[in-house]
Amino acid sequence: MESSSENSYEDIQRSSEVNVPHHPPVMRNRSLRDNIEDGFVVLDTPENDIEVKKMEQNYMFGFKKWKAHVTVRPFEERSEAVKSLYTSRFDRIRSTYVPGNITYTLWIGIPVALLYLLIGAIMAVTIIGWPYARFCWKLAGYFIWPFGKFVNEETSYEPEQASVHGEEGGNASVIEDTHAVSDNEGASRLMNDGLAAGPSSGSSDSQPIYLRKVSRTTIWRRPATYVWLLIGCPILSLAHLLVILVTGLLVVLIPVSKLYLASMKKLFLMPPEKLSISCSPPSHREQRLPQEVIMCIYQAVNLYFYKFTVDGMNIIITNMLIFVLITLSLGYVKFSEEIPVVKFIFGAISIIPLAHYIGFAITSISSQSRHVVGAFLNALFGSFIEIFIYISTLLKGKDNNSSKPCYPAIVKSALTGSLLATMLFIPGLCMVVGGLKHKEQAVNVRSASVSSTLLFISVAGAFSPTMFALTYGGFQCAQCQVGMNGSFYSYECENCRYTTVGMPGDSNFYEERVLPIVISIAVLLPMAYVIGLAYSLVTHAHVLENHFKEKEAQENRRMGNSGQHSSQASGQHSGHHATPVVLWGRTKSLVILIVSTTAMAFCAEVAVESLEHILSAEGSRITETFIGVTVIAVIPEIPEIINGIQFALKNNINLSLEIGSSIAVQVCLLQIPILVVADLILGLNFRLLFNNLDFWSVILSVIIVNYTFVDGKSDYFQGSMLCIVYFILLIMYFFAPEQVCRD
């Protein structure tokens, strides 16, 4: 749970050896209207060349739009609230008697203190463990209410160089400095009454003196140490690990988990007589030996820890990996009693963090490689989650002898749900969030119209077999009887077949007339995707680069006229030529990509296996159509939703809208053709014919999206209308009748 401090950031930046081609910096000082005139909206200045490349790919066809940094951000550019998450400052607060601290004492502090008292009593019984008994009793009083208390260790120092001796030949005195001597390893900085000591403490040119802490006590020669390691240390270590796990998962209690982790590292192997606890920092004038503050905490709860990252990944996403372990255990370990609903819920949730790791790995590799490599990875892995879920579901239906549940209907509903979510829900939610923060956001009408046109063409191609079948096909039945069911008439027919209008008896309508259209679509749609990549990466790759160069030149001229050119240019020059530090190198990203993809496959299999029990449960109102259009469609897109919201908060609503359009285009141009090919090879009973509700819902969504951005602005009112339309359609799907599978 611990993260790097400010010094570690600087060390990382000095030790990096990543070399990438230089790209021109992007200017942020232009107005939003000026930026969107040329088809791009650039609001943030990337810190280095890798971030520039990632930003370029955000505007390219066929690439995931990713907001999070793929390199280490300069620590000095972070906000003070975020800096406090990574440093070990002991910032005082007015009062420690706050609800979070009291809650800690009731639920964690008291049980831990009682355990320390018990271990102390056991150590006292052993006689030789008496020093550790007092050690445990001290810590029991500390952990029950640690706030505002200082855990100190008696220390001894020796100078690193002879020059650290004072003028009278004696060694310089030592007092604690919570900023400089909080670590037990390496050299600690000598401080004297808050000022660095030197040859002459009053001299203006005095230099800080560095001392190295030495240990003159060897605990391994004491029998009490081995009694402690056999009895007390294992039990307390398990208790500390449990507290670290629980508080770390709750995120806002990470200060507690960091405290307990530090206590394991610094206290358990400390000579017990060197421990002291005080309510104020120790002063060297009052102590026989110098003391070093090793732990101090003022509050148990910090709401800003939702911004905390572990190896570049948000702590909430990292914590959700526990659902992956639970899902794999539920799915592949036999239990006496299994609950399918629980397996499905955990399986669906586990896909969320794995999708984040897959997306971050793809973006990291793409940002450090050529655009062609990035485009290949995005095409190969960008839709892998959805494709695997769909094919697994269809295979499950192939092996299922009964017609209930109808697995092809689940897949078709999921495809429809993905289109509805990306055209209505994702843009609408981003517009609401961005509008609430920025009131009104400018939309690039030209870019939005191009995306809408491409989206309309993609949807028309994917749904053309359905349009053909609805126009020229229909059911022809024989032996129909009219019956009464209460106050309603019902028709019961036999010997029904799908025929072409005006051609009775054509029972091979799908195979002879619709299937050739489906195969043609499966060939033409991927060709459109390849053409889009060629346009973006080959024939018109210079457009984006020239745009950045032109904006840089314009900005330099403008700043030169205002007399600010030299300072700004030098700052940007140094920032872009500084060696960037990637969070995940290409090898590491590739390993994480493979592992995450494999884990996702197993978790998706567990979720799919549970579908039959959920849909077939007695009294269940959930249908194949509803679960497909909601859960299966939306869960894999959650990383994209988060990225869209982050772009909207940064006032870049255009990229938020592009996220939805790019996913919808990928559904039509890649996912549907792959499913058609898989059906031809494996015989999955997947026919590219959507029902009327799917067809008209998608057509209605495309029309609404095309008319939403004609005014060139975005606000929360327009976004809320899109979300309302989306939820209206979901209500229709909830009350839709069950699907009947037909061969």
Image (cartoon, rainbow, N blue to C red):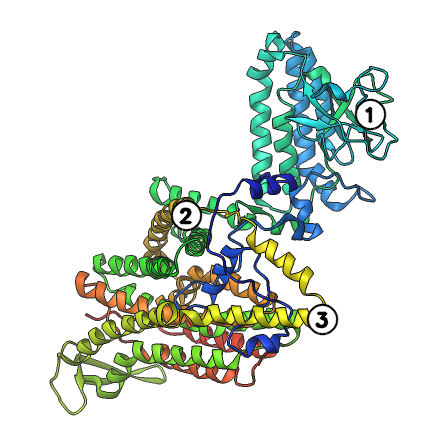
Dot placed on the residue nearer the N-terminal end, 2 or 1 = 1
Where 244 falls versus 22 (above or below)?
above
Q: Residue 698, located in which quarter of the rendered image? A: bottom left
Label 3: element kind: loop
Label 2: element kind: helix
Where 208 falls versus 474 (above or below)?
above
Is the N terminus in the top left, top right, bottom left or bottom right quadrant? top right
Where 369 falls versus 500 (above or below)?
above
Q: Where is residue 227 in the image (x, y as percent from the top left)?
A: 59, 12
Q: Where is residue 118 in the image (x, y as percent from the top left)?
A: 65, 21
Q: Position of residue 350 (x, y in %)?
A: 44, 51
User: For the residue carrying disc 3, how many other residues have a C-alpha within 10 Å: few (<14), some (14-19), or many (20+)?
Assistant: few
Where 175 falls versus 130 (above or below)?
below
Residue at screen point 33% across, 81% down: 460
Which residue is label 2 attached to?
Answer: 586
Check disc 2 and give the amino acid type. Answer: Arg
Q: What is the distance, in whole Å, between disc 3 and disc 2 at their CAs?
A: 43 Å
Which residue is label 3 attached to?
Answer: 562
Which residue is label 1 attached to?
Answer: 199
Q: What is the distance, in whole Å, between disc 3 and disc 1 at their CAs?
A: 48 Å
User: Which residue occupies the foreground of this view, 702 or 50?
Assistant: 50
Check disc 1 and give the amino acid type. Answer: Pro
Q: What is the distance, in whole Å, between disc 2 and disc 1 at their CAs?
A: 50 Å
